[in-house]
Amino acid sequence: MTNENTIPSNDAGELSGFAALGISGALLKATLAAGFAEPKPIQVQAIPPQLEGRDIFGIAQTGSGKTAAFALPILSKIIGLGTKRRPKTARALILAPTRELAVQIEDTIKLLAKGAHISTALVLGGVSRFSQVKKIAPGVDILIATPGRLTDLVREGDLILADTKWLVLDEGDRMLDMGFINDVKRIAKATAPDRQTALFSATMPNEIAELAKGLLKDPVRIEVSPQSTTAAEIVQSVVLARTKQKRQVLSKMLADEAMRTVIVFSRTKHGADRVTKDLVRDGFDAAVIHGNKSQNARQKALNDFREGSVRILVATDIAARGIDVPGISHVVNFDLPDEAESYVHRIGRTGRNGRDGIAITLCDPSENAKLRQVERIIRMKLPVVADHLGSPDPQRDPREKTERHFEPANDREHHG
């Protein structure tokens, strides 16, 4: 085991681990003491260019290690600046889409900066504004914030960003999904013109690519390969059904008591609302989470789902990121995602910790191309366990397995 006071090196005496990336001194010791033994791929790629002052555009998922990837370079630079700060200012600003993520980021930074006399503060909606203003009044080293409340404080003169030299936008696609992009642009414009910026996003819709063009100067682009395999414990299948049939097919499936705890994924926020309303009308306890819901509404839905008072949670891909609820028995894809990688993340909510899980995808003929993309990325053909396309009766049991329900995956495009 590495002693926390020993700088890691290999047999040839060369620096290794975080030391080889340029992290040194007390920060390196704190990093090792916090349990960060070996850098993850995104840290290997992102830390050196940031230490050189470069902007970063990172495509990486939750859990990839990106917090340390942007926090360590910032800490490395701020530690040498001393403790004298200008009132109402922040040397570095990290924007996150939700309170939960902002709190997690601050916790990680405190671990990494232990003993370094780095001041941090949180600016979040739904929390006492007075206490936040008081905390940032003397100036802070690193401010972690959600865009809405931060915009209010800047507008009212309680926070000055003109001296902010480091800006991080975490989970950019989720901020887009929640309607924060205009706030983000205004905030970035208020920071120092010579700031260093890092933008991280799990996906890259056109709006995020445009945001990157406007905010980043000659960025180093980093992409960590998304997971493309699915857990062996997850039984995956496809039910062929037209969009207008899906409501009845889903309700029939959910009537089975074996479907104890279920996440239903919808591609859009509007679709998620519609599915939830239909399920409630059909007599099911269901809640919904997506980017247009308030923080409190999302948290209540999650708590109800965890506690079992709601058996079915309907979610969009981005809103569901970071959900960790044990014992989810089934994942149902009401429609296929735009990006095949999202399928892997969706069904990964079930079949955890060695438990069995079941993932069922409802597929309309118009989604055949998306289905083939999914099959390519997971390197397997998904069995068709029910076919409602030629049936006027969508009530037929979708779990019923008869010979006529199975067909080769490459024949699916001939339907409809």
Image (spheres, rainbow, N blue to C red):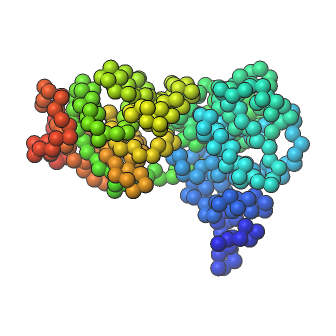
Residue 299 placement: quadrant: top right
Q: In which quadrant will I find the C terminus?
A: top left
Residue sitting at the far left: 404
- Above-or-below relation of 76 to 367: below
Q: In which quadrant will I find the N terminus?
A: bottom right
Residue 179 in view here: no
Residue 304, x across and y down, in percent: 47, 32
Q: Residue at x 25, y 50 (%)?
A: 381
Identify which residue, 247 or 257, lies in the foreground. Answer: 257
Position of 105 with respect to 229 (left or right) is: right
- Above-or-below relation of 31 to 386: below
Q: Residue at x 70, y 48 (%)?
A: 109
Residue 320, x across and y down, in percent: 47, 37
Residue 282, x across and y down, in percent: 30, 23
Identify which residue, 193 or 228, lies in the foreground. Answer: 228
Residue 127, x across and y down, in percent: 69, 28
Identify which residue, 159 or 263, lies in the foreground. Answer: 263
Residue sitting at the far bottom: 11
Q: Residue at x 80, y 47 (%)?
A: 118
Residue 308 placement: quadrant: top left
Q: Residue at x 26, y 36 (%)?
A: 256
Position of 122 with respect to 365 (left or right) is: right
